[in-house]
Amino acid sequence: MSYLNYLWFDQNFVFGTAICSLLLMMVYFRQKGLEHVLVHYRWLIVCLFLLPASFFFDVFMYIRAWVIFKFNSAPKQHDARVKNIQQQVKNWKPSDGKKMCTGRPGWATVSLRLGKYKQDMKKININLMDILEVDTKRQVVRVEPLVTMGQLTSLLLPLGWTLPIVPELDDLTLGGLIMGTGVETSSHKYGLMQHICLSYELVLPDGSVVTCTKDKNADLFYAVPWSHGTLGFLVSAEVKIIPSKQYVRIAYHPKHSIDAVVRCFTEESMDTEKNDFVECLSYSKDTAVVMTGNFTDIFETGKLNKIGSWYKPWFFKHVEKCLQNGPKVEYIPLRDYYHRHTRSIFWELQDIIPFGNHPVFRLIAGWLVPPKVSLLKLTQGETVKKLYEDHHVVQDMLVPIRKMKECLNTFDKEIKVYPLWLCPFYLPDNPGMIHPTNKDGEMYMDIGAYGEPRTANFNNVKTIRRLEKATKDFGGFQMLYADSYLTKAEFHAMFDHTLYGKVRASISFCEERMPEIYDKVHKEK
């Protein structure tokens, strides 16, 4: 009897403690306010609410995409959806006094920029998120603009196919990568996302539908990339596909001086016959790991690393160990490789969930990460938003690879954000917004900085302005998903508007109904 009384007391004690703790937490939250919680206990909101919500959203979207593709309903619905978009556009009236943009809310995009320009524009709903066709004979996949990289790899890889370029992060959409740009570790062979696209289908500002290729409506075809939805509304695209293999053989080359990093990265990037993939993670000014990869269908015993498994360490932490342990070779399943930085959102998640790479957390909750970037933006609050704007950098600068050393020194001097993501890409001299300094085409590199600056004199506006100027002086370009403080004159100097202006002038109602690129991407100082 005494044991039962003790058990009853123990259970009630635990229950009472939990209730008291919950009440105390509610009182604390009420006194401090939700904003205080979002700033100081952001990890708690993310772990308790955003991770489960993100997981169930991903499951729903995966099942939806699979059912639609299996039952072939998407192509039948595509034409009806396009007609609906046409009708929305045709309903525009001069009395509206507003220019048009997509109705997708700013928080729903992967970019950290919230897109305040949408507040004063007529929104056109573009609910096009399906893979329409996989044509293995032509080696083409036809997709709608809101299809994500996660959807594409989930569908294509089991069929034995893949995109030549698969930009990181599952939630990046094909439309965003076309209207903006996209780069990945195979880009030294294939270029940017625009260079693997074969055709675009758009609804123009007058409500008409047009298809463009390099041979048909060529000016429009070359003007669409980097136009950020200012020439019309993308409703589908045809993209090249190539045969895939099951694994990627990765060789890790740790380097301990900036000269060694530059030399190794440049040599491996230029050898497009030798390497299918080239990437570098720089952990300080003088330490980095250059990675080279190749498709393969076999792996050596004991060297298979399923890095995408929920219990595995974050990829950038895994790579960092090579600086102490030396060079090595391993094999990674192809889809795991494509999305190797997804679970940790490169290295951004360590600032949100500081213990996210701990073995216990990975074992218990690793299968839930990452939270959707859109949900993180939706719940960040004004204080967190201000902190990110003032004390956080998210920038990708595209510069000639021959300027790599100068660029690394500039980034170290201005921001000291590490790791840095370095990715080579070939830039041909095609018509459009960007051109290489060499008219025969040139190897460039993307230098991605994501994190908190460690320099004492960091000022968000002034520092980014200096990085923008350095990028222009190097003969490079700024990716426009991030904060851009370029003046309009500087913007036109960095990006060639010749073809873009010609196409805008040739499209009926474009000037009247669509904003210019600069109006969408620049940020007020």
Image (cartoon, grey):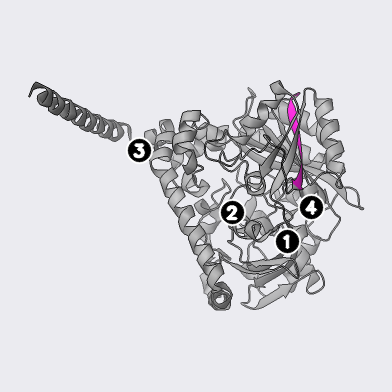
Local secondary structure at mark 2: helix
Which amino acid lies under the numbered mark 3 shown in the image of this protein? Answer: Leu
The span from disc 2 to disc 1 (Cα, nearest Å) is: 15 Å
Q: Earlier in the sequence, mark 3 or mark 4?
A: 3
Local secondary structure at mark 4: loop
Residue depicted at 35% across the width and 38% down the height: 34
In the image, residue 14 lies at what x, y percent? 21, 28
> Which residue is under mark 3?
34
Q: In this rendering, would 309 be left or right of 383?
A: right
* Res 519 seen here: yes
Give above or below for 98 relative to 83. above
Q: Give the residues in magenta.
A: 286-295
In the image, residue 328 lies at what x, y percent? 74, 30
The span from disc 2 to disc 3 (Cα, nearest Å) is: 33 Å
Residue depicted at 64% across the width and 33% down the height: 316
Q: Earlier in the sequence, mark 1 or mark 3?
A: 3
> Which residue is under mark 2?
150
In the image, residue 298 lies at what x, y percent? 73, 45
Mostly what secondary structure, the magenta segment? Answer: strand
The span from disc 1 to disc 3 (Cα, nearest Å) is: 47 Å
Numbered badge on residue 72: none
Numbered badge on residue 191: 4
Local secondary structure at mark 1: loop
58 or 274, which lies in front? 274
> Which residue is under mark 1?
241
Residue depicted at 18% across the width and 29% down the height: 11
Which amino acid lies under the numbered mark 2 shown in the image of this protein? Answer: Gly
Callout in the foreground (4, 2): 2
Residue depicted at 75% across the width and 50% down the height: 489
Location of residue 238 (image quadrant): bottom right
Q: Are marks 2 and 3 in contact (CB under 8 Å)?
A: no
